């Protein structure tokens, strides 16, 4: 005989019904409708890799996995063109047009549609290894012209009069060992682009020397040509390792500033057009990149590419002249889509990009990069909205939706708040210059306030005496920013994983069922024990 439950036991059955209904709902969900993130795969730029990896770590607790292989910009573009290797590429240069005679590289003509999306800004930094009396020099300052001459073989010794003039003291009679990249490198591209645009005649002369008969004007290149006693290294890490090693004495190499910070190694304070020696700090680079432009002319062969000409000549005293930014190359709706890509991948990719353009930029300084200013974020959001399956870009006027540190509610705060250089960083000031007063924020004008001293040319702990050239210390640092701070993961706000949300609903239903069923069940059990 079937026994129906007594009236007092109905809550137990009610809880079971709730639980079974929730489990049925879970069973009926497919992975796609549950909204799970697709795992992203990317490859390319070692210049941007430190930031891309950190952002991936930040998002992993939310169920979004990003696997990135830092095999260089040229390799990343090649992977994207295959259509079956990666969901996105990271590249500092755009797809090449075949006009790079220095590297003898062919034109890249991807069969799939794409957009360029800015990811992170940074300065091309010059790490160097020079000791005097057993002490590492950490306060080297050089003009752009001197750096150009070092890397085109015109200046070959550290005691050269032009170096002495810039630095303010004579350095040892020691050969200079330029360290350049042998692989396809964004750092090389940014550096040679700067030389080609700022010193075209001398760059052309260098090109003709290393590549007789080259067509002029000589273009920028990803592959630096061999010259003199230059040392060629493959990858950013390899450049850093060479310069910082015991056998790197006398060397100077170019790299993304993040690698110098990671190695706790000094970099050159570079003279800017305003006549100040400045480091590639986050704020100095961000100030410079306010002058960057994105080509929005769809008929132009340089469509969506960056124009840095105004960055190089910007006369704000805080601006680091060799500033630039990197791209993600991503699929674009309305054009051929790589076979590896689909709308669910696009949802994951747009989530990743929205995060790094907003909250992710908060970490840029600590990682050795510069946060992207509002002009570049605005341009990036236009391309995010074209990714197949995109979740769309956040509202740039809502700080809660996009808490990028360079603007608040769509209004730029960077130029108002960025610190100005020390009076001791002014060209012509002696190494023994002593600046004691500080002014943490600038006025937003094109010239520094008298006596403002937000930073010194050397890294933290550096010292120098006029005429001796024996600056010592740990290197790095600059502009009053804690750029060597440890970076840890942070809590982020991104759309949740649908399966996780449903599981939470089931667990909540179970908890409700137990809470409802437990009291009468326990009471019935106690009554039975008293009857016995």
Image (tube, rainbow, N blue to C red):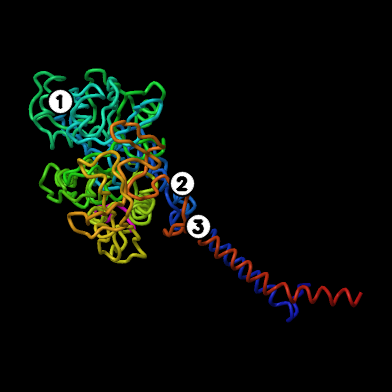
> Which quarter of the picture shows residue 469?
top left
> At which x and y percent is residue 94?
22, 39
Q: Which residue is mark 2?
A: 486
Q: Nearer the viewer, mark 3 or mark 2?
A: 2
Q: Secondary structure at mark 3?
A: helix
Q: Is residue 190 above or below residue 244?
A: below
Tell me the CA gap for discs 3 and 2. 33 Å
Residue, x 26% and y 58% (percent of image)? Answer: 442
- The span shown in magenta is 383-391
Tell me the CA gap for discs 1 and 2. 42 Å
Mark 3 or mark 2, earlier in chain:
2
The dominant secondary structure in magenta is: loop
Does the segment drawn in magenta span residue 386?
yes
Farthest residue, direction right:
532
Residue 101 badge:
1
> Which quarter of the picture shows residue 100?
top left
Mark 1 or mark 3, earlier in chain:
1
Mark 1 or mark 2, earlier in chain:
1
Tell me the CA gap for discs 1 and 3. 53 Å
Q: Is residue 334 above or below residue 159?
A: below
Q: Secondary structure at mark 1?
A: loop
Q: Which residue is mark 3?
A: 499
> At which x and y percent is residue 314?
16, 48
Label 1 crowd bin: few (<14), some (14–19), many (20+), radius 10 Å: some
Front in this rendered view, residue 509 or 366: 366
Q: Nearer the viewer, mark 1 or mark 2?
A: 2
Residue 32 visible in the current orientation: yes
């Amino acid at each position: 005989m079937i026994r129906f439950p007594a009236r007092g036991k109905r809550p137990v059955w009610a809880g079971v019904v709730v639980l079974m209904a929730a489990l049925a709902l879970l069973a009926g969900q497919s992975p796609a409708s549950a909204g799970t993130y697709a795992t992203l795969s990317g490859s390319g730029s070692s210049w941007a890799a430190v930031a891309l990896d950190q952002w991936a770590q930040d998002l992993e607790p939310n169920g979004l996995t990003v696997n990135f292989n830092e095999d260089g910009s040229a390799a990343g573009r090649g992977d994207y063109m295959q259509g079956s290797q990666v969901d996105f590429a990271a590249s500092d240069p755009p797809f090449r047009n075949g006009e790079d005679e220095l590297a003898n590289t062919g034109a890249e003509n991807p069969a799939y549609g794409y957009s360029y999306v800015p990811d992170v800004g940074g300065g091309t930094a010059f790490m160097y290894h020079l000791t005097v009396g057993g002490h590492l020099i950490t306060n080297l300052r050089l003009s752009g012209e001197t750096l150009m001459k070092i890397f085109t073989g015109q200046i070959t010794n550290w005691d050269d009069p032009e170096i002495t003039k810039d630095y303010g003291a004579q350095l040892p009679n020691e050969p200079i060992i330029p360290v350049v990249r042998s692989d396809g490198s964004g750092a090389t591209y940014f550096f040679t682009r700067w030389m080609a645009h700022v010193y075209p005649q001398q760059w052309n002369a260098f090109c003709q020397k290393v590549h007789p008969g080259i067509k002029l004007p000589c273009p920028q290149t990803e592959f630096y040509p061999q010259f003199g006693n230059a040392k060629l290294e493959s990858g950013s890490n390899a450049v850093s390792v060479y310069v910082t090693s015991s056998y790197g004495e006398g060397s100077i190499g170019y790299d993304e500033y993040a690698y110098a910070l990671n190695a706790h190694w000094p970099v050159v304070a570079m003279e800017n057009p305003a006549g100040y020696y400045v480091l590639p700090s986050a704020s100095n680079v961000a100030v410079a990149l306010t002058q960057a432009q994105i080509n929005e002319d769809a008929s132009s062969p340089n469509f969506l590419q960056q124009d840095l000409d105004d960055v190089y000549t910007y006369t704000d005293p805080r601006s680091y002249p060799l500033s630039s930014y990197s791209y993600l190359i991503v699929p674009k709706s309305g054009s051929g889509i790589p076979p590896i890509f689909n709308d669910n991948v696009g949802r994951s990719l747009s989530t990743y990009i929205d995060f790094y353009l907003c909250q992710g930029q908060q970490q840029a300084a600590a990682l050795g990069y510069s946060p992207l200013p509002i002009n570049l974020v605005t341009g990036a959001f236009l391309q995010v909205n074209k990714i197949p399956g995109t979740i769309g870009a956040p509202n740039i006027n809502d700080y809660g939706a996009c808490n990028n540190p360079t603007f608040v509610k769509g209004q730029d705060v960077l130029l108002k708040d960025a610190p100005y250089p020390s009076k001791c960083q002014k060209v012509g000031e002696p190494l023994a210059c002593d600046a004691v007063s500080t002014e943490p924020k600038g006025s937003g004008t094109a010239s520094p306030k008298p006596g403002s001293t937000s930073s010194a040319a050397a890294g933290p702990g550096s010292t120098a005496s006029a005429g001796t050239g024996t600056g010592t210390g740990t290197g790095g640092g600059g502009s009053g920013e804690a750029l060597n701070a440890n970076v840890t993961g942070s809590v982020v706000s991104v759309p949740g994983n649908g399966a996780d949300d449903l599981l939470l609903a089931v667990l909540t239903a179970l908890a409700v069922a137990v809470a409802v069923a437990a009291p009468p069940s326990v009471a019935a059990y106690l009554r039975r024990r008293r009857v016995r």
